[in-house]
Image (cartoon, rainbow, N blue to C red):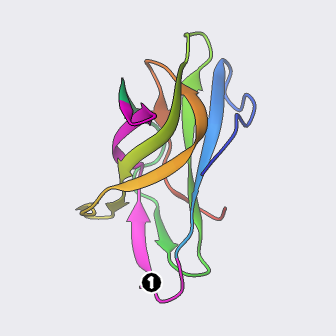
Amino acid sequence: MFRGPAGCGSWGSLHYRVTLTAPRGYEPCELAGSPTDVRFSAHGSDSGITAGRYGNQTTVVIFGPGHPVHFDIQVPSSRRGIPADEASFRLRAPDGAIPGTSFAQGGLKVATGTLVGPVRRGS
């Protein structure tokens, strides 16, 4: 689920936070860096906007039950936003992409130049 916009943590950008939680019984794993293959859609239609990444791509965090993680979606506020209600992405382990696509839902606006930050501990 998206939380945001979270204000202007960086000059000229809107920030949305994606929080990931794991259900009981899920085996903890290591994640690192920004999600990849990030795509945004609205009502099932692809927005055509893909996201770049920013920040430290090597810091390792533990994800699992009781260990939520989050990442930031940074959207330039100087550009006209396109409404979206879903993001799809692939999480990364320290040694590369993890198979499978994850999804987050909620309202946001995206634009050319949107960036995704690295996964961090906490919610």
Residue situated furthest bottom in the rendering: 25
Residue at the (41%, 85%) spot, across then down: 27
Residue at the (48%, 19%) spot, across then down: 111
Q: Is residue 110 magenta?
A: no
Q: Is residue 2 left or right of residue 40?
A: right
* Closer-to-camera residue (109/112): 109
- Circle count: 1
Question: Which stretch appears magenta?
Answer: 23-45
Q: Position of residue 16 (x, y in %)?
A: 63, 39
Q: Position of residue 78 (x, y in %)?
A: 60, 10
Residue at the (40%, 72%) spot, across then down: 30
Residue situated furthest front in the rendering: 43
Label 1 element class = loop
Residue situated furthest right in the rendering: 7
Q: Position of residue 58 (x, y in %)?
A: 40, 56
Rendered position, 114 above or below 64: above
- The amino acid beneath tag 1 is Tyr
Residue at the (50%, 50%) spot, across then down: 104
Q: Is residue 101 left or right of residue 43?
A: left
Rendered position, 86 above or below 14: below
Question: Image quadrant of residue 77?
Answer: top right
Crowd around label 1: few <14 · some 14–19 · many ≥20 (10 Å): few
Instruction: Kindly identify which residue carries mark 1.
Output: 26
Question: Image quadrant of residue 123?
Answer: bottom right
* Closer-to-camera residue (69/47): 47
Rendered position, 99 above or below 77: below
Q: Is residue 26 magenta?
A: yes
Rendered position, 49 above or below 17: above
Q: Position of residue 108 (x, y in %)?
A: 59, 32
